[in-house]
Image: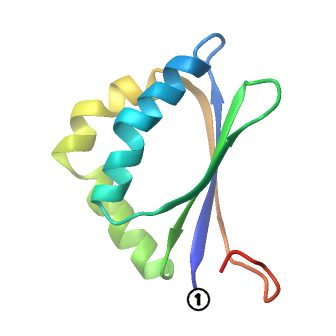
């Protein structure tokens, strides 16, 4: 069964535009490189939180791909820059309901 990650980042005050640029330039391409599709992303209406969803075939796939990504030299080179935008991170692994349009 597919597993999705709902990721909610509280972005440091005044850094949302810089974060969005960093996400587009660095985070999204790296996720794609490691075979981790990003299926949606949003900001809250206050522009203090960035919410996104990535998807995996199952829990084993999630573990394997995330370990590979976070163990890579590419992540090592960018992680401080990426993390400098983020005040708080929440990650929830979720599974779709039988009636969810997102499977």
Query: Quick check: 83 left or right of 33?
Result: right
Q: Is residue 11 above or below residue 89?
A: above
The quadrant the C terminus occupies is bottom right
Q: Nearer the viewer, residue 62 or 98?
A: 98
Residue 23 drawn at (x, y percent): 46, 35
Residue 5 drawn at (x, y percent): 59, 62
Residue 28 drawn at (x, y percent): 41, 46
Q: Is residue 62 above or below residue 6?
A: below
Colour scheme in the image?
rainbow
Residue 25 drawn at (x, y percent): 36, 34
Q: Secondary structure at mark 1?
A: loop
The quadrant the N terminus occupies is bottom right
**Residue at position x 79%, y 89% in the image:** 98
- Disc count in the image? 1
Query: Quick check: 96 left or right of 5?
Result: right
Residue projecting furthest to the top: 14
Q: Is residue 61 above or below residue 85?
A: below
Query: Quick check: 59 left or right of 70?
Result: right
**Residue at position x 17%, y 44% in the image:** 73
Q: Residues within 10 Å of mark 1 (few under 14, many from 20)?
A: few
**Residue at position x 75%, y 77% in the image:** 101
Q: Nearer the viewer, residue 1 or 103?
A: 103
Quadrant housing residue 42: top right
Q: Which residue is mark 1?
A: 1
Quadrant housing residue 48: top right
Q: Is residue 45 above or below residue 100?
A: above
């Amino acid at each position: 069964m597919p597993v999705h990650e709902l990721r909610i980042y509280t972005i440091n005050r005044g850094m949302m535009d810089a974060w969005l640029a960093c996400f587009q330039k660095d985070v999204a391409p790296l996720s794609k490189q490691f075979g981790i599709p990003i299926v949606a992303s949003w900001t809250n209406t206050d522009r203090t939180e960035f919410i996104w969803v990535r998807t995996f075939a199952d829990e084993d796939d999630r573990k394997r791909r995330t370990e590979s990504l976070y163990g890579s030299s590419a992540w090592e080179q960018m992680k401080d820059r990426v993390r400098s935008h983020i005040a708080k991170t929440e990650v929830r692994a979720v599974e779709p309901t039988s009636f969810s349009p997102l499977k």
